[in-house]
Image (cartoon, coloured by chain):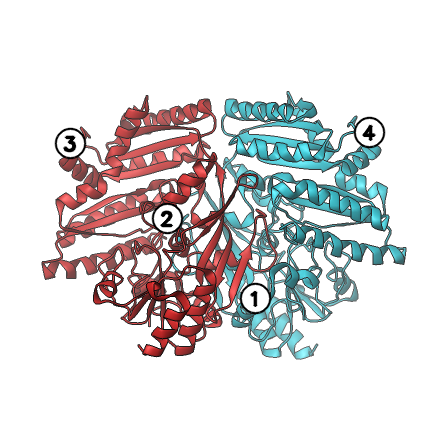
Chain colours: A cyan, B red
């Protein structure tokens, strides 16, 4: 990279905002995946105006710009690919700018960690529902760029459902403001929707105006164990069809239950095919109770072996312990895991689980299955040992077959993580050439020089 | 229009699908506004493939294509402007193709009337919530093209929140399929969001896959009358902040109440500044009751003069009668009305109502105000007599000042109706030149010859 460009970057953001040591370059070469790509330089702007200057400099020099927050992404969307260019890291833009209680909105810079934002608004009795599992270290900007989900999204909707407005630096450095505090707006195209989930390829999100709701005051939790996965799956539908929308409806299949029980000794039955963790929440204690009781009744009617309902906070937290123990339990079982986030029509859950099991048997590596059953969004996690080269090759084939299984059942590649680099080979198979074609046209229209996160979403 | 093109259109859709008599041309020159623009020909395709053929013919001949359903639009978005070209009317594509109870989805052609779709899915215990007031004659395709709202959208969200997938004929005649049955999907850009609300300028929507919810089994309704509009407005916030999300939270200001009472003699108090119609609904009778009782209590605490709660279906329908009588009441008061759909941050409702009143006084024409207070979405209706030329000139100035008032308070031009032709002069003031610029880029990328609904959204 030319030293003239480096000098200009230093001029734009200050010396302390430009990182170039080998250690720094190494740190910013990773995200939450096994992928790796080293930038030439990392820039840490403090304001939208600085971001705009950086984009103008990059555009002038035709140098790729790779935006990132905390680098917790699970699709390699924030790693320079193949390598080089400027990583623009927004973690210093971490200020909550306004909480408007009357209109139930919060305005925040892109680098605010999502859990921090939630804690702040909850102090005022407000609530920002989206809860990706990376919540304690991922940022609002990254959540929006990937349209992040989470267990609570069944009831509350995903990140994009809370985006009222964005500040976006476009590919020519101009600063776009979209939306505003009105909840409804049909004036022109839905730019909030277009930038949300665009993985940094259409513009750099520097600020967001988010919708909030009233903080739920009560929550009730139940765990239901099912001899048959098909019964568990039918139960999900029966609950939703009864007009109950739990905050959370999480499925764990037998592989997950066994894996957790082996690691944690929580007293879970390992002879069941599936369990459902159900949580209702809301402002009214009686309503929340009635909903969990009705859900539990439905579980019994649809053939649950057992239904445990938490009677107090300690019991509630003990029921959640199983779900929260999945990741550490997996780590005890194998050195590495690779988790996907396929999403299928709810009715296809039993069939896709069968197919995932068959893939596991075929390749001789465990696939642990859990996820947001109410959304049809499953996280099959392949367990393996990366040090054994034949295992990595198998994992890649297994991933391809997992995607095939999802697509064959009317499902999709990704419900939460995005395409990034890793899902590119499957994009056209999932969406078809016409869809990919017009998405490329949109990318070309908004970023004609292809400097914003090049090499992401679209196969080269 | 060349007779060769007419012949090709007849070949594509059959003789009975091509209308050209002076009477037909006149009928298809209007929508729900005062605007008018006559097409050269009307084509009524029966399939997506026929739509694709028509688009290819229009593209080849460089002739404008104006899509429409039942022509109930309120922004002149489905009228040829200035005149000429092909109106492509999708009302013959009115089949419900699939109701999938297990996944709670419905697939329908664009020309299905929304109320018909609702009635069909309700037979299976399912529910399609969006309820624009045109529901009995507007179509699903038109609702999606405008991202229609309605009273129930406070709780349930707008049309776009229910769009899972679309079939869209693009400007080159190719057929795009977006989305699918999975509830979550972050594979590539959000094309559902982009086409929803794009008013037929980016592609022609021929089919939709819509998400459904469980049909609410119970509803409870209350009417609260307030001496002060500010109190009524504060009440809206107090209810939402308490964690109650009514299906409906409708505001009528004094002008609306007086107008209804004069026409209908329902026994409404006319010495109050505002009333709120509140309805809660859901699957559980007790919960629905608790929510309406809590809402009524909040109304009393925030200074309501009176709160009437319906004790049975007859009382409920009598409370709704006032709200439903607005349009006929307005018709009795003046020969013409022009209704806008500005949307402001909720907290700005009292201030915007003050400003609307001042505009009314300044021009000497009544403005009747009602709307979806929970969303900040108001319908100021100017009453006038179009036969008096000075009144029409005044109305145009009043509309400009209404938009100014909304924008000045952080509001927007349109919460439900779209931009069409009528709001074009205000578009750049509302969104800024950068936003309009990139929207033009998107339009150019998807419709480079500008044949899809030209002259809409963007000022010439």
The disc, 1 or 4, on the residue closer to the chain's N-terminal end is 4
Label 2 residue SS: loop
Percent across and percent down for residue A110 are 57, 55
Q: What residue is shown with label 3? A: B265
In the rendered image, the quadrant that contains the N terminus of chain A is bottom right
**On the image, numbered disc 4 is attached to which residue?**
A265
Question: What is the number of callouts on the image?
Answer: 4
Q: CA distance from mark 2 to mark 1?
A: 29 Å
Q: Quadrant of residue B264?
A: top left
Label 1: which residue?
A434
| Both labels 2 and 4 in a single chain | no
Query: For the residue labelled by badge 1, is the local secondary structure a helix, a strand or a loop?
Result: helix
Q: Residues within 10 Å of mark 1 (few under 14, many from 20)?
A: some
Residues under numbered marks 2 and 4 in contact, where contact means CB atoms less than 8 Å apart:
no
Which-is-in-front pick, marks 3 and 4? 3
Q: Position of residue B50 (x, y in %)?
A: 44, 65
Residue A41 lies in quadrant: bottom right
Query: What distance separates the C-alpha of mark 1 from that of mark 4?
Result: 51 Å
- Rendered location of residue B113, percent (x, y): 37, 48
Instruction: Say whether disc 2 or disc 3 marks the residue closer to the N-terminus.
Output: 2
Q: Label 2 lies in what chain?
A: B
- The residue most toward the left is B388
Q: Position of residue B52 (x, y in %)?
A: 46, 67
Tell me the tag on residue B113.
2
Between marks 1 and 3, how big is the CA–CA gap?
Answer: 58 Å
Mark whose residue sits in front, 1 or 3 = 1
Q: Relative to B391, is B426 on the left or the right?
A: right
Badge 2, how many Cα within 10 Å: few under 14, some, many 20+? many
């Amino acid at each position: 990279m030319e030293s003239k460009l480096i000098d200009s970057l230093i001029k734009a953001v200050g010396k302390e905002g430009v990182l170039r040591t080998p250690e720094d370059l190494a740190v910013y070469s990773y995200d939450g995946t096994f992928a790796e790509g080293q930038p030439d330089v990392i820039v840490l702007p403090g304001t939208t105006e600085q971001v705009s200057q950086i984009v103008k400099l990059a555009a002038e020099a035709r140098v790729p710009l790779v935006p990132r927050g905390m680098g917790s992404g699970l699709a390699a969307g924030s790693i320079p690919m193949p390598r080089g260019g400027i990583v623009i890291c927004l973690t210093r833009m971490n200020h909550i700018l306004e909480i408007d209680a009357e209109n139930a909105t919060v305005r925040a810079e892109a680098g605010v960690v999502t859990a921090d934002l939630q804690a702040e608004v909850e102090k005022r009795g407000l609530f920002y529902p989206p809860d990706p599992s990376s919540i304690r270290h991922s940022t609002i900007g990254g959540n929006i760029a990937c349209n992040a989900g989470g267990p609570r999204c069944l009831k509350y909707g995903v990140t994009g459902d809370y985006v009222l407005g964005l500040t976006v630096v476009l590919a020519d450095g101009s600063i776009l403001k979209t939306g505003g505090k009105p909840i409804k707006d049909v004036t022109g195209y839905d730019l909030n929707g277009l930038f949300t989930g665009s993985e940094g390829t259409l513009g750099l999100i520097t600020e967001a105006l988010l919708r909030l709701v009233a903080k739920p005051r009560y929550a009730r939790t139940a765990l239901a164990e099912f001899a048959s996965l098909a019964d568990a799956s039918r139960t999900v539908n029966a609950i939703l069809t009864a007009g109950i929308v739990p905050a959370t409806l999480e499925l764990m299949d037998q592989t997950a239950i066994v894996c957790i029980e082996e690691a944690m000794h929580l007293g879970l039955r390992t002879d069941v095919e599936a369990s459902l963790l159900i949580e209702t929440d809301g402002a009214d204690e009686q309503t929340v109770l009635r909903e969990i009781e009705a859900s539990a009744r439905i579980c019994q009617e649809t053939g649950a072996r057992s239904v445990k309902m938490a009677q107090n906070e300690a019991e509630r937290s003990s029921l959640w312990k199983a779900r929260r123990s999945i990741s550490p339990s997996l780590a005890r079982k194998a050195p590495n895991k690779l988790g996907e986030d396929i999403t299928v029509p709810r009715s296809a859950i039993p069939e896709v689980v069968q197919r995932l099991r068959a893939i596991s048997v075929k390749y001789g590596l465990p696939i642990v299955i859990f996820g947001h059953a109410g959304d049809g969004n499953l996280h099959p996690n392949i367990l393996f040992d990366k040090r054994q080269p034949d295992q990595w090759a198998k994992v890649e084939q297994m991933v391809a077959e997992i995607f095939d299984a999802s697509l064959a059942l009317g499902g999709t590649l990704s419900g939460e993580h995005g395409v990034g680099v890793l899902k590119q080979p499957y994009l056209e198979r999932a969406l078809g050439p016409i869809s990919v074609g017009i998405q490329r046209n949109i990318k070309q229209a908004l970023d004609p020089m292809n400097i914003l996160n090049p090499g992401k979403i679209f196969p080269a």
